[in-house]
Image: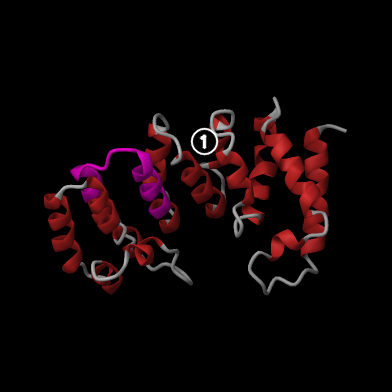
Amino acid sequence: MTTMTSLGRQLGEWAQWSRQADSGEDGWETMFPGWRELAKECQRAMLSPNALDQVDHIAECWRISEEAEEMAEFARKHVSALATMLVELCRACHPDVRWQAIDVIGDTTIGFEATFRAAFIDPDPYVRQRAFLAFARHRLVDHEMLKRVLSDPGPYVRRVAWELAHRTGRAEEVAFVRQAMETDKSEVVRLAVTRPMDWLTAAPSGPQGE
């Protein structure tokens, strides 16, 4: 039995189990009795020579483990080996996969320019938010980047400009962002300059308004 067949079979068993599972608790997806075996099979698949042939199955594993980011944490330990896979996962159908993949890419220090550019205009605001924060982790945030964040249609994206401005270490950029955010149309953005940094980057509960 090939890795692909094994992973697909185990995902099929998960799908059958999920139809009757209690989905009322966060992270319920990984309460599947065979989760440990499924997770290990996905990790093996990611590192296998035919990994790209299994990208849809791998992406589904990332989606269902999103609450604990289990696949993402594995990928952080193998970023170089999984570079091509991570780029593919940034194109996955589900935003829960895309934001995790771009966040892992943020652990790198060079490359992935095209992937970041695509993530900055992702249709999902949470993916864009995580993309800007991931980019800033080890890459230069300049004035153009701050303007890009401040012009984003999503208020939860715009509010992270405050953190990014401080990462520049330049008082003039902090002042520029403060002025823009204090006059923003969204209260979410206006309040961001008065609250601790951990509030700015925390994922909001419920849908994010554009």
**Image-based side of 199 in relation to 71, left or right:** left
Q: Which residue is mark 1?
A: 87
User: In the image, residue 76 lies at what x, y percent?
Assistant: 55, 40
Q: Residue furthest top?
A: 49
**In this picture, is 202 found above or below 64?**
below
Asked whether residue 11 is in view, the answer is: no
> Residue at left 25%, top 45%?
145
> Residue at left 66%, top 72%?
25
Which quarter of the picture shows residue 50? top right
**Image-based side of 18 in relation to 204, left or right:** right
**Image-based side of 71 in relation to 150, left or right:** right
Is 128 colored magenta in this rendering? no
User: In the image, residue 103 lies at what x, y percent?
Assistant: 47, 46
> Residue at left 36%, top 39%?
138
- Magenta segment boundaries in residue numbering: 129-147
**In this picture, is 150 found above or below 5?**
below
User: In the image, residue 124 lies at what x, y percent?
Assistant: 44, 55
Task: Identify which amino acid the numbered label 1 is placed on.
Answer: Val
Is 142 colored magenta in this rendering? yes
> Residue at left 78%, top 68%?
21
Which quarter of the picture shows residue 141? top left
Q: Of residues 187 and 175, which is closer to you in this image?
A: 175
Asked whether residue 178 is in view, the answer is: yes
